[in-house]
Amino acid sequence: MKKMSVLLSGLFVAAGAWAAAADDVVVQEPYVRLAPPNAPATGAFMVIRNTGAKDLKVIKADNPLSKITELHTHLNDGGVMKMRPVSAIEIKAKGEAVLKPGGLHVMMIDLKGPMKEGDSVPITLSFDDGSSKVVEAKVVRPMVAPAAAPMEHKHH
Amino acid sequence: MSERVLAVIAALLAALVLGLALFWHPAPPERPLPVAAGPAGGAFTVQSADGPISLDDFRGKVVLLYFGYTYCPDICPTSLMSTAAGLKLLSDEERQQVRTLFISVDPERDTPARLKEYAAFFDPGILGATASPETLADVAKRYGVFYARQPADAGSGYVVDHTSETLVVAPNGKLVGRIPHAAAPEVVVAEIRKLLIHP
């Protein structure tokens, strides 16, 4: 019996050591911004927390509603907004990445059809260790960002 | 002895207050920057689904101008939402004195019909329009607006870098201000009211 528990705890330790990035990730407040009529692209936003002890990277995102899904960011260059793809979103151990309007976002390009408020979009985040995680993001009407309110302090 | 301690504490507090007064300058609230000897602005005519729109048509009203495009996934919706939220804070009477124009710098893909529907999504009062590339280039130059196509790397066409400030034209037709990207609705309202009170 004692042997058994040693073996079991050994297994748990091993599982901990080899935990996939996806298991360490907690995604908060995911949402897709309802695309205005005739807009062929929109963004998905969320807070991605890395609860693990290792840095990780989101290297890809995917969703069934758009033909193309990319990771993007914005650079504000003297009032000119420049949207650029990023190859990865790095999240430090115990850190978080805030994807929000005007900054990092999952870009959904070439929407296959109109979306409506309240729809749920499964977004697959792929990590640099090969693991992935599906996040259900609700479609919401665009809202005005609260003035300088830190996203990370939002409660459910 | 205790008097000395009190005196020291008082001195320290005084130094702290003085230090704060001298060195602590909290960031001022986000505020539209005045256009100092900036772009001239001036008359222009763009095409909407309901016919041509000239800036002169809006003489006597405050005009908000935003240059963007409908393929814009984030920046334009964010700016237009902030403008729309600002407009909603105005009284009906005040709203009558304001016109908002969304001008597409991507006439190749944005037809006036598309733009009408797109702009109205944010607020029925926002008009969508565009113009020929030549007219757009001229208007943008005169209004200090920058835009440039950037190829998108995934074969999805192209994106357009563009100024994401909302330009403010006074009732006399003069370009007078710029509202920063994603400004709080209160900032939008303050900028409009300033001009309604001192036209």
Image (cartoon, grey):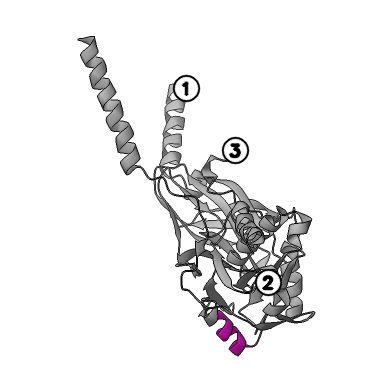
The span picked out in magenta is B132-140
Q: Position of residue A31 (x, y in %)?
A: 64, 53
Residue B3 to residue A23: above or below: above
* Structural distance between the alpha carbons of marks 2 and 3: 37 Å
- Mark 3 or mark 1, earlier in chain: 1
Q: Nearer the viewer, mark 3 or mark 1?
A: 3
Residue B3 to residue B161: above or below: above
Pointer 2 local density, CA inside 10 Å: few below 14, some 14–19, many at least 20: many
Q: Quadrant of residue B106?
A: bottom right
B181 or A37, which lies in front? B181
Labels 2, 3: one chain: no
Judged from the image, the secondary structure of the residue bearing numbered disc 3 is loop
What chain is tagged by disc 1?
Answer: A
Residue in view at x 67 percent, y 63 percent: A64
Judged from the image, the secondary structure of the residue bearing numbered disc 1 is loop
Q: Position of residue B1 (x, y in %)?
A: 19, 10
What secondary structure prevails in the magenta region?
helix
Camera sees residue A37: no
Residue B106 on the magenta segment: no
